[in-house]
Image (cartoon, rainbow, N blue to C red):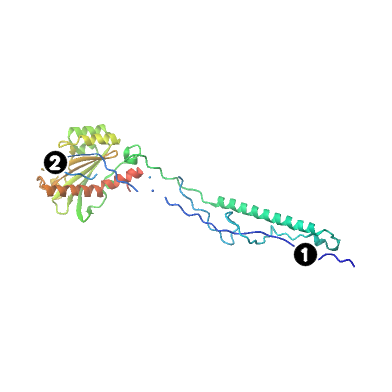
């Protein structure tokens, strides 16, 4: 009796999984530029006054073991069967009628192995494409880069067009404390004309020539009520015109002291005081500070006055100006 070879089935399957995660990138500090300064006083004081590729996207999220998406970055040696790639055909399936030689069977198995490997590569390639398509797209435009130069956006009104206000430059809090030293803001003003907040023909002419559109002022006193003063900020067209304004400052051309209604700052503008004009981009910062009684300060008094100027300008106007330098917009 004729006996045929035993029936058998042979097959291969391939598969694998990887996990991957891309680190998130981290995005820029800002400097506090100082402007040109002209100092003078009546009487003169010694010392110095105060004066930003495409954003990174999250990488491919980690794939779980049951995820249909797999990364081509690595391949495991183990294979898992899948219905699409399962192969079970054998030349011995024809039973006694089959007389195929052994080499034919081996060749068939090899062919199936190649087919299985091809399907695996195609599946992985498809997974990679799907992963790329699933990445989130950018929904917001990148921030504009800061213009080159010392003052960035604040170099001119074309890159820093927002109008200025009392609240932006002096804030809404009346009480200010710097390094334990307490001050109080007593009165503010936004002048309709820049010349209304300035004294001296040369200064008023320079403000007009510089296309000054706004001038805001505020007056302060220290806790003891011995030091009082006014700070003003003028909005000019360019850094060049602001420099011209600073150059004309002298004992006859300075910010107009803004007298308050309280019992201390009502004396602003009387007696001797110290005045100066400095610049920050297209802004001119003008100050007038004095002793309450208008007397000429001694060495200790002069130090206290300059300390007050530095404290108050640093806590108010220069915060707003540094923000405009970096962003070109008003400080909110």
Q: Secondary structure at mark 2?
A: loop
Q: Residues within 10 Å of mark 2 (few under 14, many from 20)?
A: some
Whether residue 8 sits left or right of residue 17 in the image: it is right
Of the pair 286 and 4, the residue shown nearer to us: 4
Q: Residue 108, image x and y in percent? A: 76, 57
Asked whether disc 2 touches disc 1, contact meaning CB atoms under 8 Å apart, the reply is no
The quadrant the N terminus occupies is bottom right
User: Seen from this angle, which residue lies furthest right?
Assistant: 1
Q: Looking at the image, is mark 2 or mark 1 earlier in the sequence?
A: 1
Q: Nearer the viewer, mark 2 or mark 1?
A: 1
Residue 105 higher or lower than 255, as above or below: below
Q: Which residue is mark 1?
A: 8
Q: Residues within 10 Å of mark 1 (few under 14, many from 20)?
A: few
Q: Residue 122, image x and y in percent? A: 65, 52
Of the pair 85 and 154, the residue shown nearer to us: 85
User: Can residue 322 be seen in the rendering of this structure?
Assistant: yes
Q: Which residue is mark 2?
A: 44
**Image disc number at residue 228:** none
Residue in the picture at 80% in, 59% down:
102
Q: Secondary structure at mark 1?
A: loop
Residue 292 higher or lower than 8, as above or below: above
Q: Residue 72, image x and y in percent? A: 59, 54
Whether residue 168 sits left or right of residue 267 in the image: it is right
User: Seen from this angle, which residue lies furthest bottom?
Assistant: 1
Give the mark count.
2
Residue 219 higher or lower than 105, as above or below: above
Of the pair 213 and 16, the residue shown nearer to us: 16
Tell me how far mark 2 sits from mark 1, CA to CA.
Answer: 110 Å
């Amino acid at each position: 009796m004729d006996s045929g070879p035993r029936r058998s089935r042979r097959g291969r399957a391939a598969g694998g999984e990887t996990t991957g995660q891309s680190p998130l990138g981290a995005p820029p500090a800002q400097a506090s530029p100082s402007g040109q300064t002209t100092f003078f006083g009546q009487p003169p004081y010694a010392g110095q006054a105060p004066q930003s590729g495409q954003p990174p996207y999250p990488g491919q999220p980690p794939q779980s073991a049951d995820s249909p998406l797999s990364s081509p970055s690595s391949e495991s040696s183990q294979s898992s069967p899948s219905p699409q790639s399962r192969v079970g055909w054998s030349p011995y399936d024809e039973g006694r009628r089959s007389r195929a030689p052994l080499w034919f069977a081996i060749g068939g198995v090899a062919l199936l192995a190649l087919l299985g490997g091809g399907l695996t590569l195609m599946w992985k390639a498809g997974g990679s494409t799907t992963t790329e398509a699933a990445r989130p797209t950018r929904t917001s435009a990148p921030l504009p880069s800061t213009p080159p130069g010392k003052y960035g956006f604040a170099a001119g009104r074309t890159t820093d067009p927002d109008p200025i206000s009392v609240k932006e430059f002096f804030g809404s809090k009346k009480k200010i404390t710097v390094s334990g030293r307490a001050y109080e803001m007593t009165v503010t003003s936004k002048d309709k004309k820049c010349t209304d907040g300035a004294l001296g023909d040369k200064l008023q002419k320079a403000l007009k020539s510089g296309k000054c559109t706004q001038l805001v002022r505020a007056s302060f006193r220290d806790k003891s009520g011995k030091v009082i003063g006014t700070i003003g900020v003028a909005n000019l067209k360019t850094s060049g015109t602001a420099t011209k304004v600073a150059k004309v400052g002298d004992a006859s051309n300075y910010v107009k002291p803004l007298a308050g209604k309280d019992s201390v700052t009502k004396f602003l503008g009387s007696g001797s005081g110290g005045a100066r004009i400095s610049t920050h981009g297209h802004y001119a910062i003008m100050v007038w500070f004095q002793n309450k009684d208008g007397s000429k300060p001694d060495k200790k008094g002069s130090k206290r006055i300059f300390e007050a100027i530095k404290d108050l300008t640093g806590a108010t106007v220069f915060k707003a100006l540094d923000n405009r330098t970096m962003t070109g917009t008003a400080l909110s």
